[in-house]
Image (cartoon, helix red, strand yellow):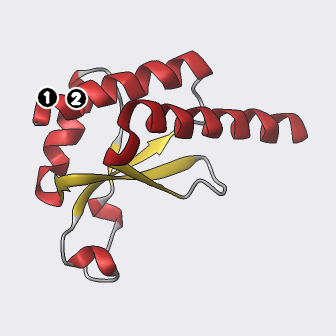
Amino acid sequence: VRRIRRLQQARQHALVQALERHLGTQVTVQGAASGLHLVVWFKGVPAALEPALVDAARACGVRVYPISPLYLPGTDERQANPAAGLVMGYALLDLPEIERGVQRLAEALQSLR
């Protein structure tokens, strides 16, 4: 159990670091304290573009999931200017795959702008 926990922590750390490296202040990461996935909010990308962001990411070979089906709008401060959000899992990825996936996600985001 300890070995798996350390492995998942390394994967999570790699994902957070890759997001910081490739997307920096364009994103806010939520849920990095535990679990096997993160929620990533994309600053400046309206929630209405979330489906397009998911499609662009998938076209680049990155499987991500929209947060909107899991999120009840109007329950916090995001209601004034809702941003696009993605659920990103990392449990089955190795570290190089995580890095490549975030690079491709950054390319997908660039294609929307």
Amino acid type, callout 2: Ala
Per the image, label 2 sits on a secondary structure element best described as helix
From the viewer's side, name the closer residue of 69 and 102. 102
Circle 2 Cα neighbour tier, 10 Å, few/some/many (<14 / 14–19 / ≥20): many
Where is residue 50 drawn, in percent x and y? 19, 50
Q: Can residue 1 be seen in this view?
A: no
Q: Kindly identify the residue that appears in the image at 89 percent across and 41 percent down.
A: 2
Distance from label 1 to label 2 (Cα)?
A: 5 Å
Amino acid type, callout 1: Ser
From the viewer's side, name the closer residue of 44 and 7. 44
Q: Can residue 52 be seen in this view?
A: yes
Q: Do the residues labelled 1 and 2 touch (CB within 8 Å)?
A: yes
Quadrant in the rendering for residue 100: top left
The residue that disc 1 covers is 111
Instruction: State whether residue 12 is above or below residue 78.
Output: above
Where is residue 40 drawn, in percent x and y? 40, 51
Quadrant in which the N terminus is drawn: top right
Residue farthest toward the bottom in the current orientation of the protein:
75
Per the image, label 1 sits on a secondary structure element best described as helix
| Residue 22, disc | none
Q: Kindly identify the residue that appears in the image at 60 percent across and 47 percent down.
A: 36
Residue 28 appears left or right of 45? right
Q: Kindly identify the residue that appears in the image at 49 percent across and 22 percent down.
A: 99
Where is residue 70 drawn, in percent x and y? 35, 64
Instruction: State whether residue 28 is above or below residue 3.
Output: below
Quadrant in which the C terminus is drawn: top left
Where is residue 62 drawn, in percent x and y? 35, 27
The residue that disc 2 covers is 108
Instruction: Count the labels in the image.
Output: 2
Residue 62 appears left or right of 49? right
Instruction: State whether residue 105 is above or below residue 43.
Output: above
